[in-house]
Amino acid sequence: MVMAGDGGDELFGGYKRVAKHLRTAWRGRLRLPLALRPALEGGKLAAELAMDWASAYSLRFSGIAPAQRAFLQDAGKLQALSYWRAPDAEGTSPLGKLMTLDYANYLPEYILRKSDLCTMAHGLEARAPFLDHRFAQRIMALPEAEVYTRPPKLLLQQALDPRLPGDLLRRQKRGFNPPLKRWLREELAGRFDGLGERLQALTSGQLARKPVDVFVRHYLERAEPLAEQVLQLLILDESLAQLRAHG
C-alpha cells in the first residue's frame, strides 16, 4: 500500500491555472460571438472569449483546443463541444466556482483515474489522506481566505509538526511531465505511418485522414508544442484498435 497526495491541489487551490484564470474573472457571463476557425496551433484564446468565464476554465486543462479539433474532424460531423460535467453545487465566489469544477471533473476524471491505473497495474493499493471525507469537510468549511492562500497550502504548512525537516516544506512542487520528445521522436516514431488512415477507419470518419497526417507532419517538422496533442492521437489509435480487437 502506498500513500498519495491526490486532492491537495483541489482542496487548497494549488494549480497555477487557477490564479491565471482568476485574473479574467471580471468577464463573468460576457462572451464574444467569435467564429471557430480550424487551426493547427493555438486557438484557445478565441475559444475562451467565445465562452462565459466559468465555462472557459475547462480550456485551461483541455488537451486539444477547439480550433485544433475542428481542423482534425470532418466538419459535417463536428459536434457541440462539451468538456465536463456540471457540479452539483457551485461556489459563490469566482475561486469557489473554479474549485467546484475541479472537484467534479479534473479530480475524478484525471487525477484519481491516473493514480488508480498506475497503482493497479503494479498490484498496489493507494490511499489519499487529503480526500478523507472528514478532513475534506473540515477544510471546505473554513473561510476561503484561510484555505486559498499565497503561497498555496500555507494552512497545511502551519499545521505540520515544526520538527519536520525544514527542506521538506521548502521543496518546489514537481510535476509528472513525461519525456514526450524522446517518446515521439524515437520509441513511438514508427506508429505515425498510416495513422490518419487508421484513425479515419477506427472513428468511422469522425477524424479525417488528410488533416491527421498534416497535423502529425507539422509536429515532426517544426511544432514541438503539439507533442501532447500528437500523443493523444496515438493513444486514441491504440485504444480504438484494442476495442475493435476485443469487441
Image (spheres, grey):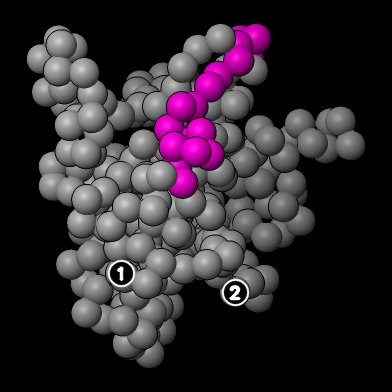
Residue 90: where, in percent of width, then height? 46, 68
Left/right of residue 80 with respect to residue 22 in the rendered view:
right
Q: Is residue 79 left or right of residue 89?
A: right
The quadrant of the image that shows the C terminus is top right
Is residue 227 visible to the viewer in this orientation of the structure?
A: no
Q: Position of residue 110 (x, y in %)?
A: 51, 41
Q: Is residue 64 visible?
A: yes
Verify CB contact (< 8 Å) between mark 1 and mark 2: no
Going by the numbered disc 1, the residue's amino acid type is Pro
What's the residue at 79%, 36% (across, down)? 243
Which label number is shown at residue 107?
Answer: none
Label 1: few (<14), some (14–19) or many (≥20) C-alpha neighbours in 10 Å: some
Label placed on residue 80: 2
Would you place residue 59 above or below residue 55 in this image? above
Which of pointers 1 and 2 lies earlier in the amino acid sequence? 2
Foreground mark, 1 or 2? Answer: 1
Secondary structure of residue under mark 2:
loop
> Which residue is the site of mark 1?
94
Instruction: Name the residue at 61% across, 53% down.
Output: 209
In magenta segment, residue 151 = no
Query: In the figure, 5 relative to 75: above or below?
Result: above
Amino acid type for the residue under numbered disc 2: Ala
Viewer-nearest residue: 167 or 120: 167
Image quadrant in which you'd find residue 18: bottom left
Q: Please state the extent of the stretch shown in magenta in the rendering.
A: 121-137
- Residue 42, position as x, y percentages in the image: 31, 60
106 or 87: nearer the eye? 87
Seen from the viewer's position, the closer of residues 134 and 79 is 134
Residue 134 painted magenta: yes
The residue positioned 28% from the left and 57% from the top of the image is: 143
